[in-house]
Image (spheres, coloured by chain):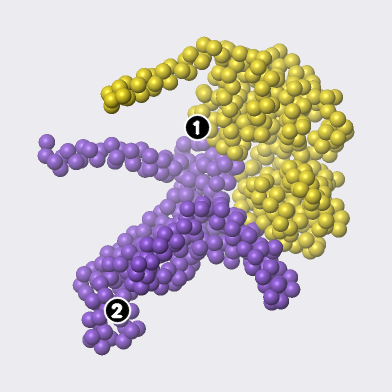
């Protein structure tokens, strides 16, 4: 092959490549889902892909804020489904980025747990814009072999037995919620705290800072800190508990009676999605709330779906692991909300960290 | 078309790309710094409120001062360590020079996170240093302050950015003609005077260039303080990150970023002036 032939071949290949997406579009409706990597594993989605003439592209997010920034910056046109936190849906609706969920096209939504049906979060004027999708708790995780008793929130504010051995997530919303729960501020006032209450919170957060080994930013990093014994107790996510127990470390998980922070992510459809793409997007939403996906998420996550679709398919142990065996546990949850004065919360958090 | 004119036209795409990719985002950031935010709505009425907030906020002023303080400290430490190293590389290493320079740069190939976690292995409560000290009987319990402290942060920052200081100084030493030092010695100048009046002025441009490079990188580094600094590891960069991400206060974040940029530009201006003066001194010599 001479140079001219090589160039011709390369050009032809490039041209065919350019037409490729068009040919694929004829074969299947293509949709793009912006989500967390752990929710979109190929095996979780394989039954849906096999049963539908839909090609699914996934784009992964690192934080909820990053997702919002992408959509605000004009990315909404190319995305068919997003995965905002229940407390963050308000950001998207206030920015007019979402369309309401058409429940007629999501039959599995009828199986939503009552707490998710009734929550005012994710809704505007009675219409749901972010449908609860999966949920969990952020508990205290601790090294049971290195602590004398199960801790509660006071471990971060009182006593000196574990000074320099504690860790807190570097996140203003949850950090301030925990201080408020410790101070006994009820959930009804927590997200609308006045100046006096915020001053109290700041005072105890400064005490907390003096007891911390570090603020953590990545759950993998916190897991390492537990494993090496640098940290014995932290406000955490659930994964280090299971991961380190599997490695033979005696870990404990505490759900303080003052309240446990519950989290929930939703599925939402950007405003511009329509026609066949909208049909495909709702078909995926329905699948994500259904039994096949729910079972795989419970076993592989382990995370709980927001519907009861897969609950009876799970063993008692699996149900217990994702907190759906005894649903009354949800009564002690404090669901994250978006405080109206969140800018002040973030400023307060930075003031504490910089003190 | 004259060759010079053709050159200008050929340079145009590069200049345009630089303008679009580098300066335009900064200009947009600058414009945002005068706006304000109400929940998720950015108001485009310009005001100086964000800059006033920075001036009034002890936290943001403190974080900015801390960032520049760290930059100065690490630049000074790397200068003290790097100066003799660069001298040795340029004047004494001989045939081993290439190998030693490569060794100097090897840590830079490993990535920030890897270097940070390596320091954790060394400095942690169960780390190599604490275990060795306990084994030697020097201490009974691990030194907690070795890791997750400003000390750990500054050790790692010094390690990370030392090569940049050494490279700047090495280039200056390479261009230092030993004849100047021989002439000074012949004229009876003692060693201390030869260093103060010949070596130091002639290597000053390398020292200032290396110092500026280290300074800027330390000021902008938030990963090292965050992962090694413990509860005191907050930086102005992480605060900007919080404002852009969590708080959706892009205007205040932009104003802090531009305040930092303005101070950095002043530092660069001062550095450039010093280098020019040093060069004039060198030419005069």
Palette colour of chain B: purple
Quick one: SS at disc 1? loop
How crowded pointer 1 is (Cα within 10 Å; few <14, some 14-19, many 20+) is rated as: few
According to the colouring, which chain is yellow? A
Give the residue at mark 1: A73
Which residue is at 69% across, 54% downward?
A225
Q: Nearer the viewer, residue B254 or B209?
A: B209
Q: Nearer the viewer, residue B68 or A41?
A: A41
Which residue is at 49% across, 67% downward?
B73
Query: From what the image shows, is residue A310 above or below residue B246?
Result: above
Query: From what the image shows, is residue B121 above or below residue A318?
Result: below
Tell me residue A147's x, y (percent).
83, 57
Cα separation, mark 1 vs mark 2, equals 57 Å
Q: Where, by quadrant of the figure, is residue B188 drawn?
A: bottom left
Residue A279 visible somewhere in the drawing: yes
Query: From what the image shows, is residue A264 above or below residue B227?
Result: above
Quick one: SS at disc 2? helix
Which is closer to the viewer, label 1 or label 2? 2
Q: Is residue A179 left or right of residue B129?
A: right
Which residue is at 41% across, 40% downward?
B25
Furthest residue toward front: A1
Residue A196 visible somewhere in the drawing: no
Which residue is at 56% across, 53% downward?
B114
Picture disc at residue B197: 2
Q: Output the chain of dot 2.
A: B
Furthest residue toward bottom: B188
Furthest residue toward left: B2
- Quadrant location of the C terminus of chain B in the rendered image: bottom left
Q: Nearer the viewer, residue B241 or A34?
A: A34
């Amino acid at each position: 092959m001479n140079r001219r032939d090589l160039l011709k071949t390369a050009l032809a290949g490039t041209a065919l490549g350019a037409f490729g997406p068009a040919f694929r579009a004829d074969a299947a409706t293509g949709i793009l889902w912006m989500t967390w990597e752990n929710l979109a594993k190929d095996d979780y989605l394989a039954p849906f892909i096999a049963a539908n003439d839909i090609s699914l592209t996934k784009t992964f997010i690192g934080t909820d804020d990053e997702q919002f920034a992408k959509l605000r910056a004009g990315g909404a046109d190319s995305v068919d489904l997003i995965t905002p936190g229940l407390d963050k849906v308000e950001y998207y609706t206030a920015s007019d980025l979402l369309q309401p969920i058409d429940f007629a096209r999501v039959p599995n939504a009828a199986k939503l747990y009552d707490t998710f049906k009734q929550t005012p979060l994710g809704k505007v004027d009675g219409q749901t814009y972010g449908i609860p999708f999966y949920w969990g708790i952020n508990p205290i995780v601790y090294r049971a072999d290195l602590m004398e008793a199960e801790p509660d929130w006071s471990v971060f504010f009182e006593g000196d037995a574990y000074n320099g051995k504690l860790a807190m997530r570097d996140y203003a919303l949850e950090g301030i919620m925990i201080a408020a729960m410790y101070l006994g501020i009820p959930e009804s006032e927590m997200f609308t705290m006045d100046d006096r209450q915020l001053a109290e919170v700041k005072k105890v957060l400064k005490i907390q800072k003096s007891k911390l080994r570090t603020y953590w930013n990545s759950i993998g990093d916190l897991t390492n800190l537990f494993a090496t014994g640098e940290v014995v107790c932290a406000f955490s996510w659930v994964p280090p508990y299971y991961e380190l127990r599997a490695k033979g470390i005696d870990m404990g998980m505490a759900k303080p009676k003052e309240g446990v922070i519950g989290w929930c992510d939703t599925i939402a459809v950007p405003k511009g999605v329509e026609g066949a793409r909208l049909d495909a997007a709702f078909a995926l939403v329905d699948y994500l709330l259904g039994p096949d996906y729910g079972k795989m998420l419970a076993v592989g996550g382990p995370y709980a779906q927001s519907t009861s679709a897969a609950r009876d398919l799970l063993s008692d142990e699996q149900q217990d692991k994702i907190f759906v065996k005894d649903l009354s546990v949800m009564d002690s949850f404090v669901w994250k909300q978006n405080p109206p004065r969140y800018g002040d919360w973030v400023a307060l958090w930075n003031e504490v960290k910089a003190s | 078309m004259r060759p010079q004119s053709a050159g200008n036209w050929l340079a145009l795409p590069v200049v345009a790309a630089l303008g679009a990719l580098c300066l335009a985002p900064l200009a947009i950031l600058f414009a945002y710094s005068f706006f304000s935010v109400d929940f998720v709505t950015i108001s485009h009425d310009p005001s100086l409120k964000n800059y006033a907030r920075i001036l009034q906020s002890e936290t943001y002023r403190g974080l900015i001062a801390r960032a520049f303080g760290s930059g100065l400290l690490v630049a000074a430490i790397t200068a003290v360590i790097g100066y003799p190293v660069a001298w040795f590389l340029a004047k004494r290493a001989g045939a081993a020079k290439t190998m030693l320079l490569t060794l100097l740069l090897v840590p830079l190939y490993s990535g920030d996170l890897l270097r940070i976690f390596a320091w954790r292995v060394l400095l942690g409560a169960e780390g190599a240093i604490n275990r060795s000290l306990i084994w030697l009987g020097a201490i009974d319990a691990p030194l907690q302050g070795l890791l997750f402290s400003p000390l750990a942060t500054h050790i790692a920052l010094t390690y990370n950015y030392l090569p940049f200081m050494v490279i700047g100084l090495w280039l200056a030493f390479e261009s230092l003609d030993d004849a100047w030092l021989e002439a000074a010695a012949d004229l009876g100048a003692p060693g201390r005077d030869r260093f103060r009046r010949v070596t130091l002025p002639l290597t000053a441009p390398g020292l200032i260039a290396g110092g500026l490079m280290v300074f800027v990188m330390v000021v902008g580094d938030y990963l090292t303080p965050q992962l090694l600094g413990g509860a005191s590891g907050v930086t102005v960069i992480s605060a900007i990150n919080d404002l852009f991400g969590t708080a959706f206060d892009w205007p205040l974040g932009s104003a802090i970023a531009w305040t930092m940029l303005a101070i950095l530009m002043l530092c660069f201006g001062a550095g450039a002036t010093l280098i020019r003066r040093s060069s004039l001194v060198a030419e005069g010599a």
